[in-house]
């Protein structure tokens, strides 16, 4: 399926390797741009490998909750091309960039966002987004370099996704509003389709 890029990232925290391929396929088919398996999930790198093998080389498959440069290398070895962190550690960002992968470090302040960009970040994970708020994101965008991709994560769901889109977010990370451990691929597919529809309604002009 081809679609216009949405910038939406599916955070599959708690997914097991046995479930991972079907759940990832459901969200990618619905129009999500990327899937992320947090490293505090069961056997996360096995899930990354399975999704990568099934989805093919062009799919954006990532590892989340990446905290150290060693985590970055292990994720890369498993086939991840996207590295997502809850925090800004310049050495993690730099190692991700050195390996040619996309880096989405978490930032809660403009100072952290600037440090992440200086280290080579691809985009900034605005986290926790609920604390920064839509007005905060707009303020960040006014001082960060033009074109900086801001991706809110944490408390983003179908009720506020449109507001983030209108504020200029480049995408969003969706976790518990999309997937909870044990959810079937069919259930996740329905939620994913709704989230993509909400995003499209507020970004198509």
Image (cartoon, helix red, strand yellow):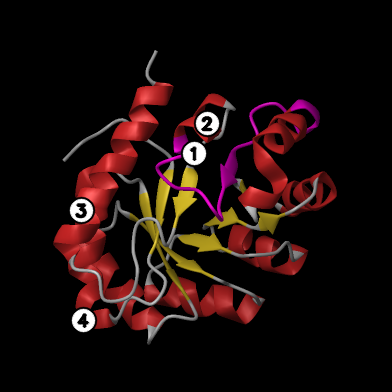
- The x and y percentages for residue 149 are 60, 37
- The x and y percentages for residue 137 are 68, 36
Q: Is residue 64 above or below residue 205?
A: below
Q: Residues within 10 Å of mark 1 (few under 14, many from 20)?
A: few
Structural distance between the alpha carbons of marks 4 and 3: 17 Å
Structural distance between the alpha carbons of marks 1 and 2: 5 Å
Q: Which mark is residue 189?
A: 3
Structural distance between the alpha carbons of marks 2 and 4: 35 Å
Q: Is residue 56 magenta?
A: no
Between 89 and 184, which is closer to the camera in this rendering?
A: 184
Q: Which-is-in-front pick, marks 4 and 3?
A: 3
Disc 4, SS: helix
Q: Which mark is residue 160?
A: 1
Which contiguous range is marked in magenta?
A: 142-161
Mark sitting earlier along the chain (3/1): 1
Q: Is residue 146 magenta?
A: yes
Residue behind mark 2: 163
């Amino acid at each position: 399926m081809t679609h216009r890029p949405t910038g939406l990232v599916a955070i599959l925290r708690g997914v097991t390797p046995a479930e991972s391929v079907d759940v990832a396929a459901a969200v990618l088919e619905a129009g999500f741009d990327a899937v992320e398996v947090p490293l505090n999930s069961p056997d996360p790198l096995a899930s990354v490998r399975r999704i990568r093998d099934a989805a093919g080389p062009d799919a954006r498959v990532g590892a989340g909750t990446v905290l150290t440069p060693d985590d970055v290398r292990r994720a890369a070895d498993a086939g991840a091309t996207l590295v997502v962190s809850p925090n800004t550690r310049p050495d993690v960002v730099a190692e991700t960039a050195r390996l040619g992968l996309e880096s989405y470090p978490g930032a809660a302040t403009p100072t952290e966002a600037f440090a992440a960009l200086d280290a080579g970040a691809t985009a900034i994970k605005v986290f926790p987004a609920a604390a920064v708020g839509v007005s905060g994101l707009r303020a960040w965008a006014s001082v960060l370099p033009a074109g900086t991709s801001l991706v809110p994560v944490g408390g983003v769901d179908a009720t506020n996704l449109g507001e983030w889109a209108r504020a200029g977010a480049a995408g969003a990370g969706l976790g518990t509003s999309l997937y909870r451990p044990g959810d079937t691929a069919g259930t996740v597919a329905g939620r994913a389709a709704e989230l993509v529809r909400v995003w499209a309604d507020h970004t198509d002009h």
